[in-house]
Amino acid sequence: MNGAAIALADAVRSGTRSARESVEESLQKIATGDHEIHAFLEVLADQALERADEIDRVVASGSDPGRLAGVPVALKDNLCTTGIPTTCSSRILEGWRPPYDATVVERLRAAGAIPIGKTNMDEFAMGSSTENSCSGPTRNPHDHDRVPGGSSGGSAAAVAAGFVPVALGSDTGGSIRQPAALCGVVGMKPTYGVVSRYGLIAFASSLDQIGPLSATVGDAALMLEVIGGHDRRDSTSLDAPAPDVLSAVEAGVEGKRIGLVTELVEDTAPEVAARVREAAEALGSAGALVEEISIPQFRYGLAAYYLIAPAEASSNLARFDGVRFGLRVDAPDVAAMNVATRTAGFGAEVKRRIMLGTYALSAGYYDAYYAKAQRVRTLVADGFALAYLRFDALLGATTPTTAFGIGDRTEDPLAMYLSDSCTVPANLAGHPAISVPFGGDELGLPVGVQVMAPALGEPTLFAVAGAVERAAPGRAGGTP
Amino acid sequence: MVIGLEVHCELATRTKLFCGCPNAFGDEPNTNVCPVCLGLPGSLPVLNRHAVELAMRIGTALGCEIRPSTFHRKNYFYPDMPKDFQITQYDAPINTGGRLELPDGSTVGIERAHLEEDTGKTTHIGGTGRIGGADYALVDYNRAGVPLVEIVSAPDVRSAAQARAYAGELRSILIATGASDGRMEEGSMRVDANVSVRRHGEPLGTRCEIKNLNSMRSLLRAITFEADRQVAQLESGERIVQETRHWDEGEGTTLSMRSKEEANDYRYFPEPDLVALVPDDRWRADVTASLPPLPAARRATLVALLGGQPSPAQIDQIRSVVASDLDAIVTSACELGAPPALALARTANEVAANAEGAASLDAGSFAKLLALEAGGELSATQAKEVLAGLLVNGGDPAEIARALGFESMRADDLAAVVAGVIEAHPGEWEKFVEGDPKVAGFLTGQVMKASGGKANGKSVAAELARLRSGAGT
């Protein structure tokens, strides 16, 4: 297991490398590289160094600082961090410092990880390019004129640029996997309920999951083991410990039945489709039984998603009203203050989705939109269930295309929404899914291959992902 | 007049509905708050099990069906509602379809009793101090997230007095089940009334909802006012507009707050941060088993003790004894042989007048006192004095009576007093002998007076009867 985070933590725990060196190296890379990439909204240099020294003292005293000892971690800026600005890349949260840590942040800290900064994102996680940020776009480390994907674009770019070995993102309709694919890193969305959402600023509560981004599948597995497991502060958190996945990464796919989803190949750019088929062949060579399967319900997923997610968001974002925290624009009375604050504080895409969601829940429209979308959601889950009668895992593209140019889709929301078409089904069903880099297109832009598994199928998911990673072009032992 | 009542009851839990903050009244503003009840970004609700249990107790006491339920979000902007939505139960409430029997024997249907969270409290400061005219407003979120059960009645109530009786009976049930302290003055119990009027036999009229009913008195006054207003409006040829009206206690009037057209579209949808609430059979059985006897059953017990149809005065005594939680004193005294009617009367009047003494009253001593009175050894006046002493200091009633000098009169002493009274009032005596029942009381009263209250009413009556039968022959 040669993950960067795993190796680093091992070195720190055994005393062969100090946490301070690890943090200094990360800070140095950010200092030299991030003015170009703009992955970070906030870098926590002093805090990180202080924490590194603490960890080094723990090691010196002969104790174990934890499984992620001294590993610098980047946190998407919708994860609450005590006393550290948490903005969701929105003007409306300007100046707000949460009085508490998200559960995942607490668990990372407890495992010895060192939060190094807060990363850029599409405002309130609404977007697929990290262009909808009040502080400007993040750039793709592979091509600075292209987007890193989104909404966890800052976290994906931070890993891809080598600023940090691992990062956390959140995935509502693909917001971890899609930028991971476009930036050529690993991005994983756990089964709904495996990771606590406490302290994640909600976009669409029934779809949101926090997950890791990393350079390797092994590092993602370690991160999931650290952040996963029951949390009584989240009622939707499953009453089970974190899944045992690190050992699964090297388990192989001998005898595993893997379905190549027609819809997640045919509806993608030729070079993306080609890489996915190559990955399928490689899995076959590694001993898996690969067959193609059509899940036609997937084609309705995106429409359902763009009703359910905005509906929940319209309610989740109501609290940003200028009364208790964040931005307040003064006005003669409370109602006018609410309007002025929200008008000034939210960006165009957020406003668009609040309006969409409000409309979908309105009296007289609820049944036609929200209720119908929920039925389609059930259909998508049924499609998965049928497929999992025959297969242990499913395979497809993570995104329809490789990274697109900055500004290319900003004027056409629908084109932007289509970037999520391959990733949305797993969110609707609440299933785990992961994007693993697998070669590139003719421009050298990375392609991501998506593996999906049934609910709580994380061990299978990581076994297949590990096999895809080992077969990836350009890796030792991989396809040339 | 047709009335439906919505009662909001704050549950007597230690902590709030979705977080661990104390559920307490009267603390410094914004001290019982946390990220969850302030609705800070990223916070999530976790349901309080005790609140669910209290809601189940209320439902069971009201004869409701306890069902698997879910939570919804009710969306509207208001500064004292931290998330700008309220978590409440919508199409699948925990309790449905019960009934409440009132002391007068009438019943009111219960449509539902569901769980929801309370809001904070806004105080408008400066200017006119009213919502539109204040300089600024302060919000206290201590109450935000306090658990409520909203109990919705069927439109079965037909008068303001019945509405008051419903609220009173419901309040005693909430207290008896331990679900709430029922303090209307602290907002623990708040009543909204839906009022409409119609001519007999006609379909239901358009209703108005009256809010801000903070006492039993305002409930009674507001409903009376509103029904009169609606009747006057209809009689002058105008229509009733469906609207929400605010009761102004000072002015004694209801004022329009908002019409149906202005009402919010609450955009209810299932609360995605909470899972379905499915109380298992065992939990439901435990709740049922742990419920104390409820007021209606306790009243029935007293009626049964009296054996036979209680008089209107006794019905009042039964209601007040149960309402003030003194019925156990009556039943224990009766178990020890005390006559039920006397036990009830003494408890409703003399015992109830001394709440502190009532709490420490020994059932044995009380029963003994009642036996002395019933046996004629103490007059009613004497018995009341002895009881007063018993309530303050306790002790043996016979000894207290002796200490007070209440030896019962010897028969010949009584005969002498009676003879004296007859001699002093010959006209009245003649009428008594002729069978006029009205003068019996007068003569008895005179004997009482002459004996200094020592004479026993029954013995006096017996002596008078003996003498009359002698005079008749």
Image (cartoon, grey):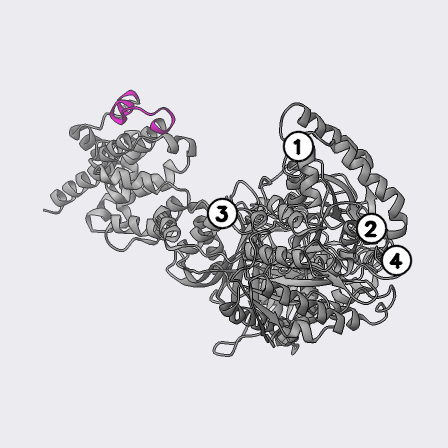
Kindly report which numbered mark, 4 or 3, lies closer to the viewer in this rendering.
4
Residue A144's disc is: 4
Image x and y of residue B26, in percent: 62, 38
Q: Main secondary structure of the magenta part?
A: helix
Subunit ID for the residue under disc 2: A
Seen from the viewer's position, the closer of residues B455 and B119 is B119
Residue at the image position 66 percent from the left and 39 percent from the top: A68
Could you say whether the residue bearing mark 4 is in a helix, strand or loop? loop
Image x and y of residue A381, in percent: 56, 68
Farthest residue to the top: give it.
B403
Whole-angstrom CA distance, mark 4 to mark 3, is 53 Å
Q: Is residue B394 magenta?
A: yes
Subunit ID for the residue under disc 1: A
Residue at the image position 42 percent from the left and 36 percent from the top: B353
Q: Which residue is mark 1?
A: A13
Q: Which residues are magenta?
A: B390-403
Q: Are marks 1 and 4 in contact (CB under 8 Å)?
A: no
Disc on the earlier residue, 2 or 4: 2
Q: Is residue A151 magenta?
A: no
Could you say whether the residue bearing mark 2 is in a helix, strand or loop? loop
Could you say whether the residue bearing mark 1 is in a helix, strand or loop? helix
Q: Badge 2: how crowded within 10 Å, few (<14), some, or many (20+)?
A: many
Q: Amino acid at mark 4?
A: His
Disc on the earlier residue, 1 or 2: 1
Q: Which residue is mark 2?
A: A39
Q: Which residue is mark 3?
A: B49
Q: Amino acid at mark 2?
A: Ala
Q: Badge 1: how crowded within 10 Å, few (<14), some, or many (20+)?
A: many
Kindly report which numbered mark, 2 or 3, lies closer to the viewer in this rendering.
2
